[in-house]
Amino acid sequence: MRYSAHLRAVDDNLKLSAWVVLISVALILIGAAGLAVGFALSAHETWAWLLIDFVIFSGIANGMLAWAVAFRIGQARWTPAINRIAHSAIAFIPFLAVVLIALLAGVAGWVPWIAHPVRTKLTWLNWPAFVTRDFLSLAVLWILFFILVRWSLNADEKARRGEDITESDHHRLNSIALACAMIYSISVTIIGWDFIMSLAPRWVSTMFGPYYFTSDMYAGLMVIIIMSAWLAKPLGVEEFLQSQQFKDLGNLMLGMSLLLMGFFYAQYVTIWYENLPDESPFLIIRYLRGPWSYIGWAAFIIEYGAPFLLLQSRYLKMHRNLLWPVAALGLAGFALERYLLIGASIIQTRTLLFPAALPAIFGFAGVFTLLVSAFLKRYSPISKADEALRKVYREIEKVETF
Amino acid sequence: MRIEPDRVRARYDDFNNFRRGLLALKHAHIHSYHAFGPTNLVDVDELMPVRFSPVRGFAIFAGFIGLVMFWVMCITTSDIYSLVVGGKPPISNVPFVIPAYEGTILSAAVIGFAVALVIAAIGFHQPPADYDPHFSEDSYGVEVLCRLGERTHIMDLLRNTGAVEVHEV
């Protein structure tokens, strides 16, 4: 089949079965009901749940888009289908924006330093500055992501009309990708400082920002793996998602788990050596003493240790049906770690925050499923700009071989 | 009673047909075959069956030994010498992770490299005794290990992908 014919065949190929829609809507209703009950009975802990769900899902969405950016900057030739799956996270951003506005509007309900100001950090931890910088950080990042995806979809349109994707199109995409990468690292670091570190306002760490945005990318990668494994057939892109692509995704995940264990250890060993009263309690509560320590080490093992050991197997990485459960395991560990980071700052004597609001996470999952599916249903599952990149490099290779 | 031959060999005089042949084997879920050719076969690497490399096994084993060895080294040296530890316990596992990690990487890299050299030197992958010299000159070849009853199907499959010669070995 000619390539152009193949594209026509796969366009609008995602048939969203009724039960997926039904389950998603049910999850959204359950989540909304959980939040309503939570706010009625225990507003402080429900704000914490909303914050946890926001950092998990914004981490996933930003991380997915950051991979699309990384592949574009790296001029990756093996990812035309993976890139489009990563682009699909953009459909979830408007929902995240609404939750962000809600969180910023109710900031007094979940940060401790408004009721108990920290005198030494008043210039940073005051609510007008907090709301302004967090809103602007994510707004700028998300606008850049929107432009990146829009320009990639414009390239699809050009290809559909039979026009060539020019060097200028590639140049524009490369430029916006570079801007996205720089702003991503700054914006998500600020979110990590404000949404997690500021809940323990006396704690200081220079390593936490990079750890936070890198672990978001790790989460995004795991969701990309799961979606690639599940959607390759429904999207009709199995030709672009073969065992070699899954092996590469698995290797990326392996490398990320090793990198993040390195970050985690670098932060841990520094605090352990210094043993300063401002720094140590953060780790002691989460990893050494009290009920949260079990969750802390369980999250570490599930998120990094187990995937690192399992992904040593090349056989596992090359088989999508074996790889995605490992990614799902790592993702569960990621969610547990975010729960730990926020939950232990809210309440230190018990590990379960007000349980009625727990289903809100399912509501987020339902919204994510619906919006991302709608995006993939509407747009081509192959990023033509990235496919064109592959062709360009093939031509260069031919010339060099000649 | 005739014994079923266990190997079928095909010769291709065109690289694209050779590639199609490997692709057909892969799609038919046949996983036991070797490929030969006068050029580097890296372009068909993804079509070849996955094989276990003994180097990987040695490297993992050496890494584990390095981890244990360097950890024990940290404990023994801390125990023997009166180190200044600034109020920390002399034997503390948290900082020992660093030398243990270095030991893991060092041992795995050195032993892995040495094993790779040894295996290359002793000719681990000698061509079969009845190797067809055409495969070093102007042809590509595929040799398939057949299970009972598969022979005819595999021979047809290879012929259909443009093999100029298919025969039992």
Image (cartoon, helix red, strand yellow):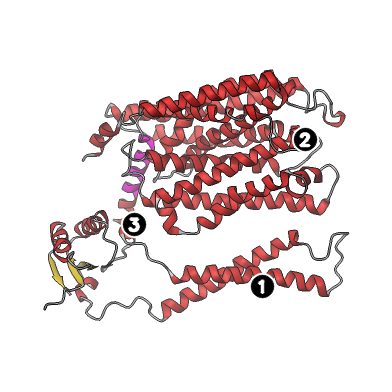
Disc 3 residue type (three-letter)? Glu
What residue do we see at 31% from left, 44% from top?
Answer: A239
Residue under label 2, please give it: A200
- The x and y percentages for residue A242 are 35, 48
What residue do we see at 72% from left, 43% from top?
Answer: A292
Q: Quadrant of the N terminus of chain A?
A: top left
Spatial CA distance of label 3 from label 2 is 50 Å
Does label 1 lie on the same chain as label 2? no
- The x and y percentages for residue B89 are 84, 62
Q: Quadrant of the C terminus of chain A?
A: bottom left
Q: Quadrant of residue A170?
A: top left
Residue under label 3, please give it: B46
Residue under label 1, please give it: B69
- The x and y percentages for residue B167 are 13, 70
Q: Is residue A276 magenta?
A: no
Disc 2 residue type (three-letter)? Ala
Spatial CA distance of label 2 from label 1 is 40 Å
Q: Can the viewer see residue A150? A: no
Q: Can the viewer see residue A336? A: yes
Q: Is residue A384 magenta?
A: yes
Of residue A66 and residue A354, the one placed in the foreground of this image is A354
The subunit carrying tag 1 is B
Secondary structure beneath dot 1 equals: helix
Tell me the magenta residue range. Answer: A382-396
Q: Quadrant of residue A182?
A: top right
